[in-house]
Amino acid sequence: MTRIVAGSAKGRVLAVPAKGTRPTSERVREALFSRLDHWGALEGAHVLDLYAGTGALALEALSRGAASADLVEKSAAAARLAARNASACSLPARVHTADARAYLGARTGSDLGGEAGLVLIDPPYSAPESEVAAVLALLGPWIAPDCVVVVERPKRAPAPALPSFLVLEDTRAWGETAAHFAAPPAPGGPDEGGSR
């Protein structure tokens, strides 16, 4: 059973398909969102959830104080389920049935000129590192200068290859899951992590 862990929709059960998605476990979501809470990355943020599946990550963020969310999921069945989950939780989410790269590639503009304050990227564990790197490279026009990007990968996988407008801030592992936290470099500061 998959539930919202905390916030306004705490305890709401999310519908999950019998196969085809891998919802992030409650234990991992609790740890991941505790870290984001600590950084102040949730309150009032616009969330972009790529590979959204059932929407568990974005809906958790909304429940904990994010202002709005766009969920991108290429499986039509999973996208319908995510929309139903958002409606059942009364959370302000827009669900887009689209491939993550195609969705991101539709916007052009300058890096760090977007509105997303939190980006959640949880591709299938079988997704090649090159796909993850391509998605990260397309984020520039979508994200704000204070954005936090979280990439969830198997613990054994290498850290994702980041574009020049992002630096790795932290990596945490829980069980077989690793979460890589990245953000734009601090203005005027060295291009290295640890600023949060």
Image (spheres, grey):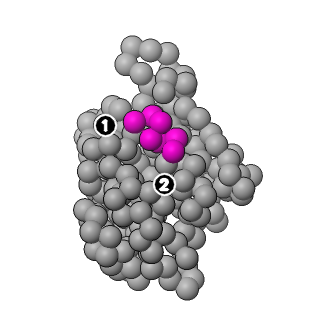
Q: Is residue 35 magenta?
A: yes
Report x, y in % for residue 116: 31, 45
Q: Is residue 135 magenta?
A: no
- In the image, taking residue 38 as reference, residue 147 lies left or right, namely left
Displayed quadrant of residue 85? bottom left
Instruction: Between residue 80 and residue 143, name the one nearer to us.
Output: 80
- In the image, taking residue 10 as reference, residue 126 lies left or right, namely right
Using the image, determine if residue 184 lies above or below residue 50: above
Asked whether residue 6 is in view, the answer is: yes
User: Circle 2 sits on which residue?
Assistant: 121
Badge 2 or badge 1: first in the primary sequence: 2
Asked whether residue 49 is in view, the answer is: no
Report x, y in % for residue 195: 49, 23
Predominant secondary structure, magenta span: helix
Say the numbered circle drawn on residue 144. 1
Which structural element holds mark 2?
A: strand
Which structural element holds mark 1?
A: strand
Displayed quadrant of residue 52? bottom left
Q: Which residues are magenta?
A: 34-40
The residue type indicated by label 1 comes to: Ala
Confirm or deny contact between disc 2 and disc 1 (CB under 8 A). Answer: no
